[in-house]
Amino acid sequence: EYILEAENLEFSYMDGTTAIRNLSLKLEKGKKYAVVGNNGAGKSTLFLHFNGVHRPAKGNIKYKGEVVNYSHKRLKELRKNVGVVFQDPDNQLFSASVYQDISFGPVNLGWPEEKIRAKVEQALKRTGTWDFKDKPTHFLSHGQKKRVAIAGILAMEPEVIFLDEPTAGLDPFYCTEMMQLLDDFNQMGATLILSSHDLNEVYAWADYIFVMNSGEIIAEGLPEEIFRNA
Ligand code: ADP
Ligand code: ADP
């Protein structure tokens, strides 16, 4: 069984731009996926279908084999289990402090205070953001903000995490650290999907790769296969 599926997805923005064209894919639990494609290929748009922010004009999203019908209950379940980390952390962080930002999701889930504190502290430690937990997020560097955005998703302990260009804007040393951080979550059982415009960056990391162009998946397979045919 697949944890998430997209079936014949179609999506256009209000201005008429078609961002996703007849796209289908299947994700297995516990794996590491990469979606590779140029800017504008549709990666971000695709990711936002998996937590219900975008609804397909045609086609379906399935979670654990069941079509997501966008009822309040089903959307809540989806957002609890599927986290999306945006490419630009400034679009995700808006609270007065790092700690509050990371607490936002868990508070929304209605968890008891004790559990919230434990999960937020764990996320702070795992992402190396503990030292600036009381700072306002707008005082942080880009790399620090990215880690806070990831911590906010992690604290909710989703089964699946989509990360939109997690290493964009980080220098090479921090890129390596970021990929290691992601590996740790995967080892704890999370299914990961990250986007990148650089096949070289994800080739050694991913279990399986989808290549996107103009809203379509134009190739998919094991990294060696994709690399050989690129
Ligand atoms: P990627 O993440 O691969 O860079 P996007 O999903 O951001 O691709 O964009 C896919 C297409 O949709 C592009 O043509 C882009 O210009 C367009 N697009 C993205 N966001 C919007 C929007 N809010 N309104 C209109 N068009 C958009
Ligand atoms: P800048 O060097 O431009 O401020 P960073 O946010 O990347 O940008 O680095 C700020 C500090 O955060 C670094 O000195 C480093 O100690 C820490 N740091 C950055 N990225 C990571 C990471 N992925 N894992 C652990 N620590 C990091």
Image (cartoon, rainbow, N blue to C red):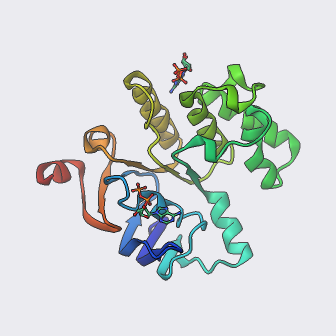
Residue 65 makes an appearance in the image: no
Ligand 1 in which quarter: bottom left
Instruction: Give the residue furthest to the front.
Output: 15
Q: Is residue 209 left or right of residue 87?
A: left
**Residue 47 screen position, x and y as percent:** 49, 60
Q: Position of residue 68 (x, y in %)?
A: 58, 77
Q: Is residue 79 above or below residue 179?
A: below
- Closer-to-camera residue (41/117): 41
Is residue 135 in view? yes
Residue, far right: 113
Residue 67 image position (x, y, % from top left): 55, 79
Q: Tell me which residue sits at (73%, 49%) in the image.
A: 105
| Quadrant of the drawing holding the N terminus | bottom left
**Where is 197 relative to 9, above or below?**
above
Question: Which of these two is toward me, 136 or 61?
Answer: 136
Q: Position of residue 55 (x, y in %)?
A: 56, 74
Q: Is residue 197 left or right of residue 87?
A: left
Q: For this view, does 125 lie left or right of residue 162?
A: right
Q: Residue at x 50, y 81 (%)?
A: 57
User: Residue at the bottom extreme?
Assistant: 58
Q: Quadrant of residue 144?
A: top right
Outermost residue, left direction? 228
Residue at (49, 32) in percent of width and height: 181
Q: How many marks?
A: 0
Residue drawn at x 85%, y 39% is 114
